[in-house]
Image: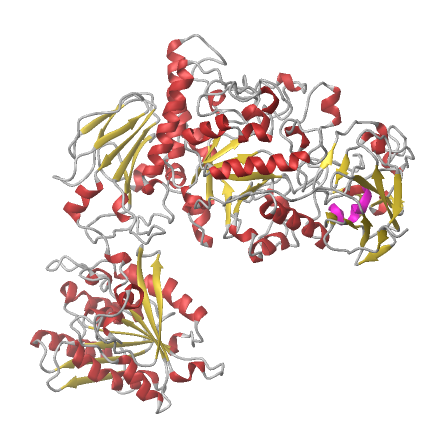
Amino acid sequence: MDTLLPGSPYPLGATWDGSGVNFALFAEQATGVELCLFEDAEAPREAVRIPLTMQTDHVWHLYVRNLRPGQLYGYRVYGPYQPEHGLRFNPHKFVLDPYAKALHGPIRWHDATHGYTILHPDEDLSYDERDSAPYLPRCVVIDPRFDWEDDQHPNIPLHDSVIYEAHVKGLTMQHPAIPAELRGTYLGIAHPAMIAYLRDLGITALELLPVHQFANDRHLEEQGLNNYWGYNTLNFFAPATQYTRCEKPGGHVREFKQMVKALHAAGIEVILDVVYNHTAEGSHLGPTLSFRGIDNQAYYRLVNDDARYCMDYTGTGNTLNMVHQRSLQLVMDSLRYWVTEMRVDGFRFDLAAALARGLYEGGQLSSFLDIIHQDPLLSQVKLIAEPWDVGPGGYQVGNFPVLWAEWNGKYRDTVRRFWKGDEAQVAELAYRLAGSSDLYERNGRAPAASINFITAHDGFTLRDLVSYNEKHNEANGEGNNDGDSHNNSWNCGAEGETDDEVINALRAQQQRNFLATLLFSQGVPMLLHGDEYGRTQGGNNNVYCQDNPISWMDWELTDEQKALYDWTRRLIAFRQAHPVLHRGTFFQGREIHGEGIKDIEWYRPDGVLMGDSEWDDGMVRCIGMLLNGQLIAERAPSGEIIRDDVLLILLNAYHETIPFTLPGNEGGPDWQLELDTSHPDKSEAEPMPVGSVYALEGRSLVILSQDGEAWAAQYGRYESNLRHAALAPIIGGPPLAKRTITGNLVTIVGFFSPELNNYRDILIYLPPSYDNGSLDRYPVVYMHDGQNLFDATTSYIGVEWGVDETMEALAQQGIEAIVVGIPNIGERRIDEYSPFIDEASGGGIRGDAYVDFLSNTLKPHIDRAFRTKPEPEFTTIMGASMGGLISLYAMLQRPDSFGNAGMMSGAFWFGERAIFDYVRQYKGVPGRVYLDVGTAEETQLKQDVRNMGQLLMDKGYTFGRKLRYVEEHGGEHNEAAWGRRFGKAIQWLLLRR
């Protein structure tokens, strides 16, 4: 008939274009497909079946004119029924479109929903001919149009986020201010009363338990229970109809969008808990609802030597086949749909390790992870992994790649054990409090990779964690055999509810301890809905089937619950007000000022820094963590340097009070009490001088602060790590003086050194032939005091070395190289240019970290970004004065990086001439050395340089071959003299002999 056209194989699903609907269904092994159209929602069977005769690349497609949104449809798919080969086609079974954007109606469980005859002796090898259409939902053609008005993604940086894990129904079902008809729905969350509550609490992201259309388990229905959580996906595009009261087919799609729009308007992001690892069809004995009847081999991972059975890495009976390109496409198309059409802001992937099981089981090379990283849309949203599954090697905490954050199960377990009073916890606790660098830093991730949580939907609530030693899941109908029995919980002296005031007071304090620990840890805190006021589930730690007041939020709060809510609000507000509590980068734990000052320090109760003996002492249960907010070394999006107060967090898991000496230098800023979990109402206290003793009560957490401005007034501002002086004329407007750069100079702005915890611009001179179209590679010269090399306007005294002009001239002789200028950090340059302490100047000691920065961070980046000859023999390190000292040290310390060193007027006197002892003890002759001095320089400096030349010859540096020594007549200790000598020096170092 003329209403039918061939249609298109793309996009998959049912797509309305204003004139009709295009249907496209992937079914690779099928021999035929029929489109089923229903006249109305109550019809038990389809009114029309239309064969799809066109097939392109295994996609069956058809266009039907004059169909409109609201049309109900589905499919019947023909093909061999050979379960032993993984083929389970059965046209008697109505199947749902995997790409349907909405479903209508529930599943009415019946034996006919299975492709085989239940109780048949051959089990799933039998074949059932009963029609399943009367018992299944219908797919709905939707109108995707929606007026988003000026909706924008909040785009909150992950490290600034506070995530609130919630259930659509559980959050709203009993809220008295939400109209009864909206409770338990998407529109219930969009209601102003709910929005106001979330904003008042201070959370930034709402993470919703599954809202993909899910199936209620048959065995639960037979017990009078429901699948409450929704981890039983039936369709990956359709919003769950369980959370709508709209009777119009597809109307709930609009309601979901209204919810997102309302949350965005309040500045709250929406993160979806998604279940792409398995479906509701279960094991080989499960029903035929969709995927199984369309292409079982493509959609499910089957046992290699017996395709009758599904692989089960999820504990649900099946695992989605992410190795197959069409299954992978299904997941990617679904994710993109929820971002583009439904405008969500991120995803939490249930049992994400199952998705990563590509060709390299559980490894980072799976196609799923690769495609996510390459996708320009999905790579920019929040990606959170539950980094485990139930299969072999499924525990993958810390192993997901860059762009991914992870539920940090190790954080949960460690914090629970610490506050329970277990022994030997403080060493691991320190890692967890500081962002879990041991898990996430090694592959380049930041603290925000750690999603920290104490409780989640799966397990005890916070109130139950401190009230029950054992689970109490009898209501689930499984004899209390379900749920985890290892909870690291402590009931504080009585199992369950009690009238004992002492026990209840301790439970309240333990909840405050957990909440404060969570909100004051580096990483991203995730709060379970209701924990902010002490919601209980009566000890049930597996409420997946409890769609009733056991799981729902109770909004009739007691005075104790109101107090805990206010405490939680206070914690969140304090965290958001203090960027040092949610840094974008890991702490370095190294001295930064050269004065013993670090960005993080750990203290014993006597005010002394923790040592190895304390970390190894299993009986230690009390520590202090100092976070220096003046040393964050990060910039706000506006470009301003981020600074904060100095915070001191004291944690005492002992049952007794411990006197804690407040650390700091004598005369330093006073400490001010901010919060004390043992006195939650205490908001003001007298300032306490450094050295004061604070009575840290048993099982309590305290946070104190030193005013950041007062701290900076005493120790100075640490600004040099963020200066961009070399580029100021370029970025900030017209230069004050004419720049003197010759040739091609590239600047990397704000290059970060994790070794030094600072930033600087890196200046790269490229030779004239670099851009001539060839693939030539070049030697590299790394030079210190980089701001003095190329441009008089940035040089120390207004005189540059003229390195760029010299290199341009040498290029005419066929001598070319890349020169990397590394600007110093200002007045404290001597700290980085020597590994030795100099008592007279008070400088030095950071030289090793500086050399590590050059070798481990800067050189690898330069070698990746430019066409270099990366081998040591083609790599020179060079500098003058202190730069000469560190150049010699760097070549000897890291011969794997630097094969040559140039030292002009080397400051070998620094640190009581410790470099001489270092050279004497050195074995081997790693490279070539250029050494010079001016005759007009200080007598002792000249003698030191001459002595170093003699020492190097004694060590095997043959004069003229391995060593070149020059004394410039009349040469002084300044940039002009070094610039004059640079040409001959670099020419000798670059010419190979």
Query: Taking the image as drawn, is residue 920 in sight?
Result: no
**In the image, 973: left or right of 68?**
left
Q: Residue at x 59, y 56 (%)?
A: 370
Would residue 300 be counted in the magenta stretch? yes
Q: Residue at x 15, y 40 (%)?
A: 668
The span picked out in magenta is 293-305
Q: Residue furthest top?
A: 499
Q: Residue at x 49, y 14 (%)?
A: 495
Residue 534 vertical placement versus 268 (above, below): above
Which x, y percent locates residue 651? 32, 30
Which x, y percent locates residue 701? 32, 28
Q: Residue furthest left?
A: 939
Which x, y percent locates residue 238? 68, 39
Which quadrant would the C terminus be assigned to in this image? bottom left
- Nearer to us in this view, 252 or 403: 252
- Residue 210, image quadrant: top right
Query: Taking the image as drawn, is residue 820 in sight?
Result: yes
Which x, y percent locates residue 389? 61, 40
**In the image, 792: left or right of 925?**
left
Residue 609 vertical placement versus 731 (above, below): above
Would residue 340 be counted in the magenta stretch? no
- Nearer to us in this view, 274 or 149: 149
Q: Residue at x 38, y 68 (%)?
A: 859
